[in-house]
Image: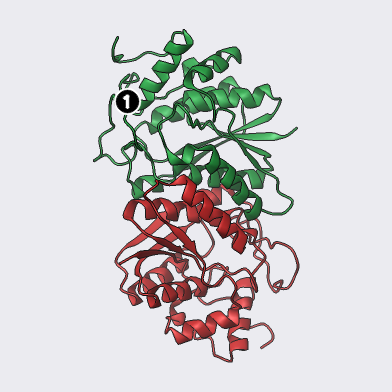
Chain colours: A green, B red
Amino acid sequence: MSTAICLVSGGMDSCVTAAIARSQGLDLAFLHVAYGQLTEKRELRAFHEIADYYDVTERLCIDGGYLREIGGSALTDRSIGVPEGEVDRPGIPLTYVPFRNANLLAIATSWAEVIGGSYLYVGAVEEDSSGYPDCRKSFFAAFNEVVRLGTKLETSIEVVTPLIRMSKRDIVLCGIELQAPLDLTWSCYQAGELACGRCDSCLLRLRGFEQAGVNDPIAYKTRLGS
Amino acid sequence: MSTAICLVSGGMDSCVTAAIARSQGLDLAFLHVAYGQLTEKRELRAFHEIADYYDVTERLCIDGGYLREIGGSALTDRSIGVPEGEVDRPGIPLTYVPFRNANLLAIATSWAEVIGGSYLYVGAVEEDSSGYPDCRKSFFAAFNEVVRLGTKLETSIEVVTPLIRMSKRDIVLCGIELQAPLDLTWSCYQAGELACGRCDSCLLRLRGFEQAGVNDPIAYKTRLGS
């Protein structure tokens, strides 16, 4: 049976991505990279709870704290505030972590080459997302070429992005259809007991549930406009 | 003035690469990634000595220890011995660290995007090298495409590999011409007071000096065939 390495942040998108990989009959291995983001601990808890739900024994949690040293993002640099209510502002938001996804994919590819994983499942979303350059379909296609050229001849690893063309609404509906444990996920950019309900990530998630006509099972501190 | 981020392991190739970047009038920033390789400490010393030689103030030393956790290489997995005297054996050697160069380039690109670096200078050698897939010119060309697509529109970063088509002989001669501090470099894969003179890396280096008709300024424990 082929193994899919799922990049699981602990958020809704990566959870639904894992659900899709499982529904396709693949063995799952879960990879989590902490990189000094504000919600590091909360995300790790979500990671393990989702892994438990899917009975995933092959788990790797990586310290990518060097991304915090490099900085340049509201998610890793404490001197840059996390923006609120700016989800429709054009341009690349302050939460962009420079070239983060290439770092995550490089780590995942190294691991896949060692354990014999065939696929890297990544929950990136191009449309209805935050405008991060490293979430585009063309970026992942180019990375697949790097994987092909930069690994052993006998290695075969493919980056798969099943959500790339989905809207948040579609992701919610897909997750519900596949019985993904959306109640265990954490999407918020702010560190807190409850999701803030105001950062870009909360706003996009809430909008997705609203458009799907479904109630978000997690609790929020506040909901803008509600 | 444009800044070149030089990936400096502390070995001869990266030292000559830095010398080339300097000779082209670029500002230098030095990046070193320790990844749990046997010679981690010795390489770091070489890194700082070379940086001192070039008066480089912008230095970043990254803990990429996760590559050791992932393992799969004689350089990072203590249970796999470093091969000796096998430099001409066909195939990918046991010292291959799976997809290592993509990890290093991803880190370097993130840093370059934050500090405004224009070039990544990498001392990879395709010919006369060890057959690592992530040292091929085609791999770096593909990575440049990933950089273009995965960073901000206003970001311009190019991976440059000035040694890629050189032989070790050419690298020695180039280093001497540019007055690169080859005496400060460390190429050996084994941890020891002196370079072992028997691992692939020592053998390739010694052969390069021999073919250049120049004496290697560093000391060796033993020299095969001498």
Q: Is residue B93 left or right of residue A6?
A: right
Looking at the picture, how far across and down is residue A115, in whole percent? 66, 43
Query: The disc numbered 1 marks a residue on which chain?
Result: A
Looking at the picture, how far across and down is residue A161, in whole percent? 58, 33
Is B156 placed above or below A142 here?
A: below
Looking at the picture, how far across and down is residue A120, in whole percent? 61, 37
**A98 or B145, nearer to the observer:** B145
Residue B83 is drawn in which quadrant?
bottom right
The amino acid sitting under disc 1 is: Cys
Residue at image x 40%, y 16%? A207
Residue annotated with mark 1:
A199
Quadrant of the drawing holding the C terminus of chain B: bottom right
Q: How many marks?
A: 1
Q: Is residue A145 left or right of residue B177?
A: right
Quadrant of the drawing holding the N terminus of chain B: bottom left
Residue at image x 58%, y 85%? B209
Is A150 placed above or below B135 here?
A: above
Looking at the picture, how far across and down is residue A81, in whole percent? 25, 34
Residue at image x 48%, y 46%? B149
Query: What is the crowding at mark 1: few (fewer than 14 residues within 10 Å), some, or many (at least 20)?
Result: many
